[in-house]
Amino acid sequence: MTTPQMDLTPELRGLQERWRELGRKEQDQLYARELAVPLARRFAQLPLAGAPADLERPRALISVLGFSWQPVALMAAWCRPERMLVLGTEDSLTVKVDGEGVLSLIARIAGIDRDVISEEMVGDPGERDIYESIHRFLHRSGIPAREVLIDPTGGKKSMSASAALAGFLVGAPLAYVDYHEYHGPNRIPVPGTEYPRLLTNPLEVFGDVELRAVLAAFDRGDFQQAAEQAERLAKQLYETREAQCLAALARAYDAWERFDFESAQLSLTEARDLLDRFASQGRWGWAGHVRPTLASNLEALEELAAARGRITPGDGGEPDRLEDGLPFLLWYLATAERRLEAGRPSQAALMVYAAMERYVRLCLQVDHRLGGKRPDYERVRGQLDQVEYDRAGRTLFGDDYRPQDLRGPITFLNGAQLLRGLGSTRLQASDLGPLRGLSSARNDCEYEHAWIPKVPETKRIETFLERAKEVVARIAGGRDALDRRLERYRVPRLAPPGD
């Protein structure tokens, strides 16, 4: 990292040499009278060493004041803050230089109004005082912590450490007035060699722990949690783009799960754009194998949004074409896969059930115009094969089956029975047993009816899912075509392949 240096005039260099020859008190007087203002102006023009290009100058400044007031004045000149808080002891806050109060001196040198500066007196020990003072300042100012600079240069070590800890916790950037040169055995900073430096964020080293937690939450399907974790991480980092990209990615799939396709498209597009622009500049280990999936996921979202737009709301709201219902079936199947991978077989059972229920209703609507809460069964009475209808009923309902007239809304099992009774090839007799098993597994799980629920075995739900794919493939152009289309609905895993 190259560090910036002030460009001093010959006159300032002469004053600098005079300063070296003086005693400590006289040095402070010379600095205040002749060096401070021109040095502050030059200091204010220096870049913040170590800062990412997109880190804007802060709106507020919190500085720790010791007996060396010079760094506080310089940082105030660099920030030109709307609001400034100075934390000091009774001794440091009451210092006068040539009869001028230290805070007035800082304001004059920095070129800001004295009214901008508020002070808080810190006791001994002062850690809690500092935490509470910073908390009050952030609350009262209403300025986000990201736009508040913490300057722990001055003050005793415990005060500087406390201010830095508070700043890190709330996500405020930490800066330091550093020096190129020191003078004498006491290593007094030489005026004119100062420069502002952003302190390295420890999350640049330790952030991989936080990042792994985001990736893990995403990969187990906890998208809202992943988004919240990534957003918190972004607030604590100087270079925020990877965390912002992960937050957008998680928000996209969270919205997708809620069938909010518009929000999902917006967030996924944001994530893709961040990834395309900035992933190569960082070390985003997950980006390479995720990028290809985003394009196909966006295609799937467009397909879903278009299909939803063609479904008329109101009573029933059923798709009128197979192609308008198929995207929803694909999404349920892909979600079931993901739930199984995450070790959630009950949720997977619900998704497979949802896919099959909608498949049955889709076929009845498209082929026979039977849909809505009050289907018109008169349309199909003459086509019904009563023998096959009853046979299907006994397979689906077992000993509880009793022949009855067509009536009421179409549900999962009676819809499957009706589809078979109407001679549909979209549902085979061999499908009925697995459908009954799926219904039983769903009803017994912890999300449905059983007082003492039974979490279904993963292998059993995998079997039902495989059968569901075979069934849906009949309206998708065959199994190979289904698998190709299903690939676009699969959420990427962020963990590298093989992990």
Image: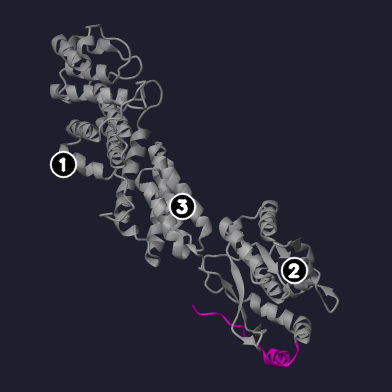
- Label 2, on which residue? 112
The mark closer to the camera, 2 or 3, is 3
Residue 266 appears in the rendering: no
- Residue drawn where x is 36% and y is 34% of the image: 308
As for residue 3 lying within the magenta part, the answer is: yes
> Could you give the CA–CA distance between mark 2 and mark 1, rounded to whole angstroms?
71 Å
Expressed as whole percent of the image width and height from the top left, the position of residue 86 reads: 72, 65
The mark closer to the camera, 2 or 1, is 2
Residue stretch rendered in magenta on the structure: 1-23
Expressed as whole percent of the image width and height from the top left, the position of residue 174 reads: 58, 66
Q: Residues within 10 Å of mark 1 (few under 14, many from 20)?
A: few
Expressed as whole percent of the image width and height from the top left, the position of residue 403 reads: 22, 7
- Residue drawn where x is 32% and y is 46% of the image: 491
- Label 1, on which residue? 480
- Kindly state the secondary structure of the residue where label 2 is placed: loop
**CB of mark 2 within 8 Å of CB of mark 3?**
no
- Label 3, on which residue? 230
- Kindly state the secondary structure of the residue where label 3 is placed: helix
Viewer-closest of 224 and 485: 224
Q: Quadrant of the C terminus?
A: bottom left
> Could you give the CA–CA distance between mark 2 and mark 3, rounded to whole angstroms?
37 Å
Q: Is 31 rendered above or below residue 454?
A: below
Give residue 253's mark. none
Q: Residues within 10 Å of mark 2 (few under 14, many from 20)?
A: many
Residue 60 appears in the rendering: yes
Q: Which residue type carries mark 1?
A: Asp
Q: Which residue type carries mark 2?
A: Ile
Expressed as whole percent of the image width and height from the top left, the position of residue 413 reads: 25, 19
Q: Of label 2 and label 1, which has the lower sequence position?
A: 2
Viewer-closest of 152 and 465: 152
